[in-house]
Image (cartoon, helix red, strand yellow):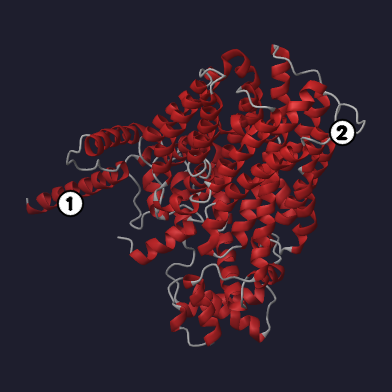
Amino acid sequence: MISEEKKKHDRSSSSGSGSGTEFEHHDRHDGQYHHGHQHDLGPDGTAKDGRDVSKKLANPLAGISPERLAAMGEDYARLAELTSDEDMRAFRLGAMLAGGQTSHHSIPDLTDEEREILERETTHKWSNPKMLYWMIAVCSLCAAVQGMDETVVNGAQIFYKVQFDIGTTSQRDTWLVGLCNGAPYLCCAIIACWLTDPMNRLLGRRGTIFVSCLISALACFWQAFTNTWWHMFIARFFLGFGIGPKSATTPIFAAECSPPKLRGALTMQWQMWTAFGIMIGYVADLAFYPVPDHGISQGLNWRLMMGSAMIPAVIVCFLAFICPESPRWYLTKSRHADAFASLCALRFNKVQAARDLFYTHTLLKAEEKAMELGSRGGRIKELFTVRRNRNAMFASEIVMFMQQFCGVNVIAYFSSEIFREAGYSDVEALAASLGFGVINWLFALPAFYTIDTFGRRNLLLTTFPLMALFMFFTGFSFWIPEESKAHIACIALGVYLFGMVYSPGEGPVPFTYSAEAYPLYIRPIGMSLATATTWFFNFILAVTWPSMLTAFKPQGGFSWYGGWNIIGFFLVLFFVPETKEKTLEELDSVFDVPLRRQAAYGAKQSVYFWRRYVFRQEVSKPELPHDEVEWREKEVIRERADGMDRTARV
């Protein structure tokens, strides 16, 4: 059995799943694995080796005595050439704390001030040095850049599509409008998101953020000076080189610099502040709408809308290098002294910094072994051939795909056109779009609490039917006679209600879930696939909606995505297991279950729901499929033991 203290430690580690410094993969202490998994072993045994290495990654310092840890800390300080008495003391004490088996109360060499600060890590987790909050502010601004890049086009397209002669409802024009809108996401899916790793290796986290924000700023400026649809397409395609690497790097940068107890919350901030940027994009659209042309060819207001997104990107460019670089990145370059200096700026004292640096260094050494193993065994191949990995990929791809095909970005990118179709004036349509942006941001805030209490799977199962309902409600509201006040009111109500249920559900869950699902040695590939999936289908949605609106009318278009939300509900019900509060060990058990058994559990769970909460019958909950696997293993072991006893008696 796993002690409650260890489970608590593992769960706090898994909260930082996006960081690259905490890893969501553990194994069973008895050396066995789950029933049926022997079929997943390759001829070279790499899948088993991967599990053995992953056990080490769960806590690379487990089982080492405090005395040995202290000696290891001093050895590392000498390796890093940090040999002053103060630094040697910090690494000796920090290594003992990093092992997780020694309380700071039982280490006599700590000062009262150091003990108080270590105690406050638990009792006042938001009490941290100003530099850490400066880093958080820069990362939040990066997320706002992302959101603003995505939505300024919402209002600008009202004007530029007319100026570029693609403003009719012909098949050609509707496809070209969609192509211009979706250009950045096409770039992200096929090129930009795959550049994230080499850019990070070469430039570091700060450098990647600086370059991607610089590209975003230049592309936004470029968009403001376009004069044809194909020129706009090229400029927006170039914008994708700023969106892709930034979206992948910023959450990692925040997580790698943060204390463990804040890591989960700071990983979540990306979604919340992206929603804030989306809202600011709508504000810019509304603010620049009344600007006259002043003799500018093809109009001025839409150019200011498109160019305004460069402002937060330029601010980030100026601020990026004020923050310390990621200590983990410094370690990958063997720049140990720089990594220590970086952590000292992000922590209150050197003992904290030494503890975190020593642990990260030890973890990186274990990670290097895992990566070498993955390369030797063919990590891409094992993504498909190892059931535990394959099921994680399937669940991750479902939630990433549905993040787009729930239809949210139909509203985010085209809400002004939707409200104009409903009978709003241009200004009223932009104001109504701003209302959606405000709701999208405000209702992202509860996700900080609900994602770890209500659970990922439960959030999705609750919100998908509601999103379907509100999509159908919005679409059907277009049948209300236009002369009725209910026509406009019901359309706006449906859009806003959809935003309310999307923001705490399909908004934050996909990236959090995907980062938890994959074991370390294939996680870079898995997360690249997940990111590429969401950007690709983002492009598909953006490029098809204008034509769909013409062909299906609003009633059919919204119903199309309402139907996909129903499909999403059943996909989650049958194939997406819960990962909330799972220890690192339990995640292996969760995903190493045959899909037919997981689907059967989903069917039993739906029957249980109806009988328990609708018909008010007293029925027991269905047994979790991974618990069933463990029960069957125990039965096999017991039967073997009984057989041996009978043989001995004979």
Q: Considering only vertical position in the picture, is 341 above or below 31?
A: below
Circle on res. 118: none
Q: Considering only vertical position in the picture, is 363 above or below 269?
A: below
Write down the quadrant of residue 188 in the picture: top right
Q: Specify the amino acid type for callout 1.
A: Ala
Which of these two is toward me, 478 or 22?
478
Q: Label 1: which residue?
A: 641
Give the alpha-carbon distance from disc 1 to disc 2, as whole Å. Answer: 78 Å
Q: Position of residue 417 (x, y in %)?
A: 66, 26
Write down the quadrant of residue 257 in the picture: bottom right
Q: Secondary structure at mark 1?
A: helix
Q: Are marks 1 and 2 in contact (CB under 8 Å)?
A: no
**Residue drawn at point x = 73 percent, y = 27 percent:** 158
Q: Position of residue 307 (x, y in %)?
A: 80, 40
Q: Position of residue 27 (x, y in %)?
A: 40, 53
Q: Secondary structure at mark 2?
A: loop
Q: Position of residue 73 (x, y in %)?
A: 57, 76
Q: Considering only vertical position in the picture, is 370 above or below 557?
A: below
Viewed as shown, does residue 339 lie left or right of 92?
A: right
- Looking at this rendering, what residue extends furthest in the left direction? 650
Q: Specify the amino acid type for callout 2.
A: Phe
Q: Label 2: which residue?
A: 225
**Residue drawn at point x = 43 percent, y = 39 percent:** 460
- Count up the numbered dots: 2
Quadrant location of the N terminus? bottom left
Q: Residues within 10 Å of mark 1 (few under 14, many from 20)?
A: few
Of discs 1 and 2, which sits in the foreground?
2
Which of these two is toward me, 274 or 377?
274
**Residue drawn at point x = 69 percent, y = 50 percent:** 142
Q: Considering only vertical position in the picture, is 524 above or below 575?
A: below
Asked whether residue 196 is in view, the answer is: no
Mark before the other along the chain sequence, 1 or 2: 2
